[in-house]
Amino acid sequence: MISLSKFTTILITHLLESGRYGTARAYRSALNRLVIYWGSDEISFADISPAMLKSYEQYLFHRGCKRNTVSLYMRMLRSICNQAANRGICNIQKGLFEEVFTHTDSSEKRAVSPSVIRKIREAKLPVGSMLDFSRNMFLLSFYLRGIPFVDLIHLRKKDINHGVLRYRRSKTGKLLTVGLEPCATEIFRKYASAVKKSPYLLPIIKGEGLEAYRQYQNALRGYNLYLHKLSAFLKLNVNLTSYVARHSWATAAYRQGIPVAIISESMGHSSEKITYTYLASFDNRTLCHANRKVIALVIDKILPTVISDKILNDKRTQLFPL
């Protein structure tokens, strides 16, 4: 009987051959973590049990893995097991992954206010520096309805026609249409001379296939590094990452009263459920204000309360500790 490690290696090979480099990388990371935990690459599918998975989950948490990282490893492992079962390689017991975390923890995601975006936009940075470039990519992501970095850097010149950008989400394949505002066009024009001989709109991807994927990975690491430096330089006291622009756009739209269905469509989400995970971690204060408005319907005067965002977003906070 083929081992889990060997079967996963076969899947990774097929994924690489079909150009699905991101999924191949996720499978490889999940397998490497599991092998370290197990102490050997000789892992059989019969070894995967609810008790083993719970022990593995605790192992990951104790080593500092965030909940979304643990979820990724578990979901990749579940996918591997399901594919093996579909091929008749193993039998998967019902509810095998029910006791481990396989969802998205929205508390790890953060948005920044429009005032912070404005401060980033107006900052005086050395022209042509990596700080300046990262700032421009961050703003572009925000201006283009929270476009993910992977889709942003793969945009091609042919994707723009008569002031309209059309591109497919790399994650879902969904076609999105975005009207180009002058602020976005201005940034693209800054790099026009650097991409004269390139089909891309931005000077990042220069290869094809696996080489292009490696260039994306390197660019993403550099982007996040310089966003961290940008936050420190501007004394923002926030953790800027590639996804902050995306979450910030969604949150700003929501707070402007734009329906979740429209936000979901704008961001290319496959369902509104995904959009709600983006909004859940941001809106405790809005919910607090809404609750006070409802209570005001039955109580003539409500004493003003001041509750910090830190307290609102801290799930450990208890008014009456047990």
Image: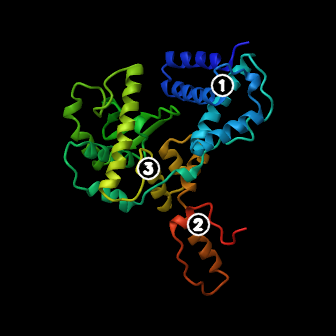
Give the camera-side residue of 300 and 165. Answer: 300
The quadrant of the rendering that contains the N terminus is: top right
Callout 3 amino acid = Val
Along the polypeptide, which appears first: circle 1 or circle 3? Answer: 1
Image location of residue 137, percent across then percent down: 33, 43
Label 1, residues with CA under 10 Å away: few <14, some 14-19, many ≥20: many
Q: Earlier in the sequence, mark 2 or mark 1?
A: 1
Q: Is 208 above or below relative to 116?
A: above
Rendered image: mark on residue 287: 2
Q: How is the image coloured?
A: rainbow
| Residue beneath the point at 62% across and 44% down | 62
Amino acid on which the number 2 mark rests in the picture: Leu
Viewer-closest of 10 and 149: 10
Q: Which residue is mark 1?
A: 80
Mark identifier at residue 244: 3
Q: Is residue 291 visible?
A: yes
Q: Which mark is residue 318?
A: none
Spot occupied by residue 180 in the image (x, y as percentages of width and height): 33, 44
x 70%, y 13%: residue: 2
CA gap, disc 1 to disc 3? 31 Å
Q: Residues within 10 Å of mark 3 (few under 14, many from 20)?
A: many
The kind of secondary structure element at disc 1 is: helix
What is the CA distance from the residue labelled 2 to the residue labelled 3?
Answer: 21 Å
**Label pair 2/1, CB-CB below 8 angstroms:** no
Of circles 2 and 3, which is in front?
A: 3
Quadrant in the picture for the C terminus = bottom right
Choose mark 2 or mark 1, whichever is in front: 1
